[in-house]
Amino acid sequence: MPPSDPPKIEPSSPIPEITDSIDELDITGYATLVTDDFDITEALEAALNEIFSRYDKDNDGFLNDSELDNFATFTNGQPFTPEEKADISENLDCSETTGHLSLSGFIQMYALQTCAGDEQETWKDLLKHGYNSNLLLSQK
Ligand SMILES: [Ca+2]
């Protein structure tokens, strides 16, 4: 038998995380989410309106704690941490009396993320909620 090659030492690779598997999402050809004025497009705003309404079960125009938890759990697999919730109430439009996230705060959250260049992250959430790459709800 010819001498075999020395065993290859695999470079230690980071443990892949399930949640990162979609990180390579290629959004080429997807609908535009940001306008030339660095605002979100009307189509994105309409989609966010619709998604918000799914979680605003009591229809008061705000996401209370359990409604926000439902949103975060569906979208991220877990509720927001207390720190994230504090960030939300400090930085986004919330009810002055209850502190609950308003529709405009919700849209603001995505506008900040999307316009900051994290369109992939926004697309992941949109796809998760049943939108296709044309930003239309695909019927299942
Ligand atoms: Ca509500």
Image: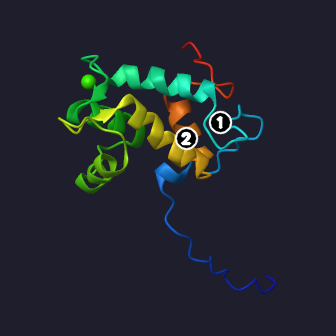
Report the quarter where the C terminus lies.
top right
Residue at 64 percent of width and 31 percent of height: 41
Residue at the farthest right position: 2
Mark 2 touches mark 1? (CB < 8 Å): yes
Q: Is residue 2 above or below residue 64?
A: below
- Residue 122 is marked as 2
Residue 91 is left or right of residue 4, and the answer is: left
Q: Amino acid at mark 1?
A: Leu
Q: Position of residue 8 (x, y in %)?
A: 67, 80
Residue at 44 percent of width and 24 percent of height: 51
* Residues packed near mark 2 inside 10 Å, few (<14), some (14 to 19) or many (20 plus): some
Residue at mark 1: C-beta within 8 A of ligand 1: no
Residue at the farthest top position: 139
Q: Position of residue 26 (x, y in %)?
A: 70, 44
Q: How many angstroms separate mark 2 from mark 1 (CA)?
A: 9 Å
The answer to which of 133 and 97 lies nearer the viewer is: 97
Q: Position of residue 2 (x, y in %)?
A: 81, 84
Q: Which residue is mark 1?
A: 33
Q: Amino acid at mark 2?
A: Thr
Residue 82 is left or right of residue 22, and the answer is: left
Residue at 62 percent of width and 19 percent of height: 136
Q: First in sequence, mark 2 or 1: give its number.
A: 1
What secondary structure is marked by label 1? loop
